[in-house]
Structures are given as C-alpha cells and as structure tokens.
Amino acid sequence: MADRRLQVFHTVARLLSFTKAAETLHMTQPAVTFQVRQLEEHFNTRLFDRTHNRISLTEAGRCVYQYADRIFDLYGQMENAVRELTGEISGTLLIGASTTIAEYMLPALLGDFRLKYPDVDVQLKVSNTEGIVTMVENNDIDLGVVEAPVMNKNLAVATCRMDQLVAIVPPSHPLAGQPRVAVHELLKYPYICREEGSGTREVISEYLQRCGVDLGEVHVCMELGSPESIKGAVEAGMGVSIVSRATIHKELRLGTLEALQLEPLLERPFSFVHQKQKFRHRAMDELLEFARQYCEDHADAGSAGIPPAHGG
C-alpha cells in the first residue's frame, strides 16, 4: 500500500481543502492535518501556503503532487497487472448518478452486475447532473451517469441509451385522453419543473427554446427536487410537468397519471462520464462494458425504461 501520508497529501492538494479531504477520506480534520505535517517534516519544507482560510501548493508541494499522481497511477497499474494474472476482478468503485438514473435505471443494472462480480464493491452517490459532473472533475468518483449533455472536453462521455421525456397530467385534466400534445398547448397550464442544476430541467429548457417558447413567459407554479415530488404534485392537480417516461411505470399502471407524447418529440441520452486521463481499474472497465451491453440488450425497452433485474 502506498504511503498513507502521501495519499492524504494528494487528496488535500487535489481538493485544496483540508475539510473536504477529511470528508472524502472519512477522517477527522486534525488527523488529515497531522498526516500532511508528517510529510512536510519528512521533506523539511512546507507543501502548502495557508492564507486567509485558503490553501495553495508551494513549489515543493506542486513537485510532490506531480510525483504522487504518477505513483498512484503506477500503483493502480500494478494492481491491475496482478489481477490480470490471477483472474481476480475486485475492488471498490465510486459511482455517481443523477437522481432519475439513480432511482429508476441503476438499481436493476447494478443488481445484475453484483451477481456477476460479487467481489466488486460499488458505492453510489446521488446528486443532480451538475453535481455529478463536478465530482468527476474533482476525481471524487470514478464514473458518473448523467442525463444531460456534458460540456467539459477533458472528460470522456459515452451514450448508454436514449430516454424519452413525456408530458404528464392527472386523469381529470382537460388534456387527459390525448395521445400527444403540442408543447405550446401544454404550457397554457401551470407548469411544475425541477430545480436549478437538474439535468432534466436543462434538457427541457433547451427543448423549449428550440420550440420558440419564451422561458420568461412559462407559468412555473412550483420547482421541486425529485421526480417523485413532481409526480405527487401533478397527481394532486397542482400543475402539469415533463418527466422521463422511465419514472412513471407505476403511476400509469395505477391510473393516477396520464402520459402524453410531446410534439415535437423530446429525447435525451443517458451518458457515462469519466476522466480521460485517469487510470482505470479493471473493475471499472468491466462495469463500463457490462453497462454498455446491458443497455444494448434492453434497447427495446427504450422509452419504457429498463426492466427489473432477474432474481432480485
């Protein structure tokens, strides 16, 4: 195992925060500070400048950080090389997913992955798309799965599958019973949308602009932070909304909501996003390949979402 002091220093240097490093490493802040000071004593020089509650790397700190990056990359390659020889696929993967994907797509996929690779520990963090992309950029997670376009060209992005978004209304609504609805007709009614930073909100806003809708004139009656809360508000007759079809299977079966195809059609990609340059453990390569194959196998589910995992 690589020097613990170097691991702690590398995390602080990457995040430029002792507090965030302590949270990431599940350590107390004094313990993090102690490890960094031990390393500074070893080199007999300061690695960080500390001014006005902010820190920055000294010249020596930048040198140590660059070598630490190479050391941990080589360490990961060594682990992979040994596991290639032994045939072992194990380790811990940190996955981040935006809300819709985490709640309605990943449970089935990760459940089947766990059956095939029981020695891989997959830990899932949930945030909106903006938060997930930030985690990938900061190396807080190995892989993100998001529901909106990613603009950072330093990140690798690959489409998992396409997702259709539809209008939803309660059964008593004047639009109920129609198979499809023009977006301008839908927006004559109070509209319930997701919060700022949501990938779903970003995709819908871009769609409305393409359709010539003035966003300032949309009667937004509520902003809510999850598909579940939006569905509940629509069921209660508080407004209409646009959501992923994959999120409303239960409500359609129960008859508490009706889905209307939008005109023009609205689709978006669910995408994998990860660092281009970051060394990937074999377990992550296996997960990426498994997920690609899984999405391909369930392509026919398309707008109906991914079915439950077999056996669980």
Image: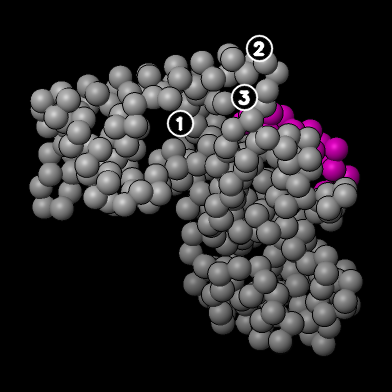
Whether residue 118 is situated above or below residue 26 in the rendered picture? above
In this rendering, the label closer to the viewer, 1 or 2: 2
Q: Amino acid at mark 3?
A: Arg
The answer, for residue 225, to whether it is visible in the render is: yes
Q: Is residue 180 visible?
A: no
Task: Name the element at disc 3.
Answer: helix
Query: Where 23 sits versus 76, above or below?
Result: below
The reply to whether dot 1 and dot 2 touch (C-beta < 8 Å) is no
| Relative to 33, 7 lies left or right | right
Identify residue for label 1. 154
Residue at 76% x, 78% y is: 169
Q: Which residue is mark 3?
A: 282
Between 125 and 241, the one nearer to me in the picture? 125
Q: Secondary structure at mark 2?
A: helix
| Residue type of the residue flagged with mark 1 | Asn
**Mark 3 closeness class: few <14, some 14–19, many ≥20 residues within 10 Å:** many
Mark 2 = which residue? Answer: 85
Residue 80 or residue 271, whichever sits in front: 80
Judge from the rendering whether residue 19 lies leftward or rightward of residue 121; answer left or right: left
The verdict on residue 287 being magenta is: yes
Which numbered disc, 3 or 2, marks the residue that appears first in the sequence? 2
CA–CA distance in space, label 1 to label 2: 32 Å
* Residue 273 to residue 257: above or below: above
Determine the secondary structure under disc 1. loop
Look at the image and give the residue range highlighted in magenta.
282-302
Q: CA distance from mark 3 to mark 1?
A: 21 Å
**Is 29 contained in the magenta span?**
no
The residue type indicated by label 2 comes to Leu
Query: N-terminal of the two: label 1 or label 2?
Result: 2
| Residue 161, image x, y percentages | 74, 42
